[in-house]
Image: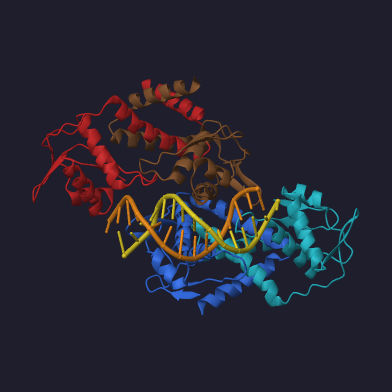
Chain colours: A brown, B red, C blue, D cyan, E orange, F yellow
Amino acid sequence: MTTDRQGSGLQFILDPTGGVPYYRQIIMQIEMAIADGRLRTGIQLPTVRALAVDLQINPNTVARAYNELEIRGIVNTQQGTGTFISDKKIDLTDSERSEVLAGLVRSFLATASSYGFTVDQIMTYLDERKEGQKQ
Amino acid sequence: MTTDRQGSGLQFILDPTGGVPYYRQIIMQIEMAIADGRLRTGIQLPTVRALAVDLQINPNTVARAYNELEIRGIVNTQQGTGTFISDKKIDLTDSERSEVLAGLVRSFLATASSYGFTVDQIMTYLDERKEGQKQ
Amino acid sequence: MTTDRQGSGLQFILDPTGGVPYYRQIIMQIEMAIADGRLRTGIQLPTVRALAVDLQINPNTVARAYNELEIRGIVNTQQGTGTFISDKKIDLTDSERSEVLAGLVRSFLATASSYGFTVDQIMTYLDERKEGQKQ
Amino acid sequence: MTTDRQGSGLQFILDPTGGVPYYRQIIMQIEMAIADGRLRTGIQLPTVRALAVDLQINPNTVARAYNELEIRGIVNTQQGTGTFISDKKIDLTDSERSEVLAGLVRSFLATASSYGFTVDQIMTYLDERKEGQKQ
DNA sequence: GTGGTCTAGACCACA
DNA sequence: GTGGTCTAGACCACT
């Protein structure tokens, strides 16, 4: 299950194995695309029906993913028009943003270490990941 | 949710987000700990009840994790005594370990992106953090 | 369409006219119950199926309401156990809380005034509403 | 979303949350303004395009609101000239006005509760705010 | 054309 | 017993 959308340059891939629900996979892939800049404020996502056809799943499943993103303020949907990446301006000061990020990182590192990963291993992995995407 | 057990020296951390059930998180953390030597044959795991209290989850959830580990021969339950690491080796290839880490990273980046952080910003922050700790 | 649940003392009423979707009516009634203290942290909501039967609607519709509340952090669901009012601790200082509330009020008053209501009319209405509930 | 039009002295405010469509919010605000005398027979409403720009919404949405008002005889569209308040009276009973206000209040309280505020806290704040303004 | 709501029903995962 | 996911399909609301 894979698709390549013209506008956004997004390619969704669903993995039916692994137990991660489709709608959650869609959410995560959109979040990742926002994180690394492939999706920016104002860009329109594929329509519910189009993505459903591409991924060969039920439109309700796509709608559910979009709906959760909407509730979380990540996208913005306008009936009859489409679904767009929101311009969520988190009006935090730089220091507040740093605090939030520090908290996220701390929690992530704690979790990873409970799986036996050291900070060095994680940094190495992230660096490799970064290089892999550049190519 | 976190705990530090005396005997095993293990610290479990459960992530309620991301849809991975608790019992599976417990299983994975025990397997990883065995694979990298933090848990060795014969070591006693926390009792079901103790771990449940520590993690503030239902004892059935812990029991299920232990039960599945027992079925797979990874631990060994002695009625009335406790649950112990059996002598079955767990050899994880590098790629298997990488996969686990990749999953953790993916989930972390997805969360961070929903707060408006880009991968670049996160990498920069991590690099700074790393530098800061070296000194 | 009405129901009276024993545990919570909640009575849901759905209005099929007016165009407000059922799931949104359920959400608002739960939020209101939290606001005026009928629902407190840790209280279990009716099960999805029970509420669906009571309200004579599809369980999916109830689930959708609960799901949105969960995404917004207002309730906390545990598979196999039930849905509970979350202990959402908003770790804000008092002054930050005041600011948030002030913002909400300012926005509400602005909206109301665009419908031609004066602050005095609104206060009068609120006082009457308060009295009505005391009795 | 807010705007202040020269001619009418009307300020429209749209609430994107709560599920009430924009076109209906516009209609209600115009009706209320006519009912309480802020808009009188013959006054010109903002042009469709101007209001759409001000409110940052689709012109079709404004057009739909005006269109429905025209069908109900409340406004009067003159091709190429503009849209004007017609001489049809709108008499809202007190209970009808109360209903509108009740809806606004309900929605406001629901939102506030999702931030963890109780009705009591809100009332206290409003009372203090009122006192502060008297002085 | 877009998305939104609701139903009916199947099957799964968790406690 | 809980809630979660997904499908299929109907009908509505908005642009």
In the rendered view of the protein, which quadrant contains the C terminus of chain B? top left
Picture coordinates of residue F5, whole percent (x, y): 42, 50
The one nearer the camera, A83 or B39, is A83
Between A114 and A133, the one lying in front of the other is: A133
Q: How many marks?
A: 0
Left or right? Give the position of D40 relative to F8: right
Whether A106 is drawn above or below C19: the answer is above
Q: Is residue D128 left or right of residue B72?
A: right
Q: Tell me which corner region of the image, top left, top right, bottom left or bottom right, holds residue D29.
A: bottom right
Quarter of the image holding residue A94?
top right
Give the x, y percent position of residue C2: 49, 75
Q: Which quadrant holds residue B93?
A: top left
Q: Residue at x 91, y 54 (%)?
A: D81
* Left-right relation of B42 to D92: left
Res B6 visible? yes
Horizontally, residue D56 falls left or right of residue A78, namely right
Q: Is residue A119 above or below residue D3?
A: above
Viewer-proximal residue, B22 or C97? B22
For the residue pair B104 and C44, the one nearer the viewer reads as B104
The picture places residue C4, in percent across and down from the top left corner, at 43, 75
Vertical comparison of B91 with B52: above or below:
above
User: Residue at point 78% right, 55% down?
Assistant: D63
Is residue C10 among what the camera can see? no
Q: Picture coordinates of residue D105 (x, y %)?
A: 61, 65
Residue at 48% x, 37% y is A29
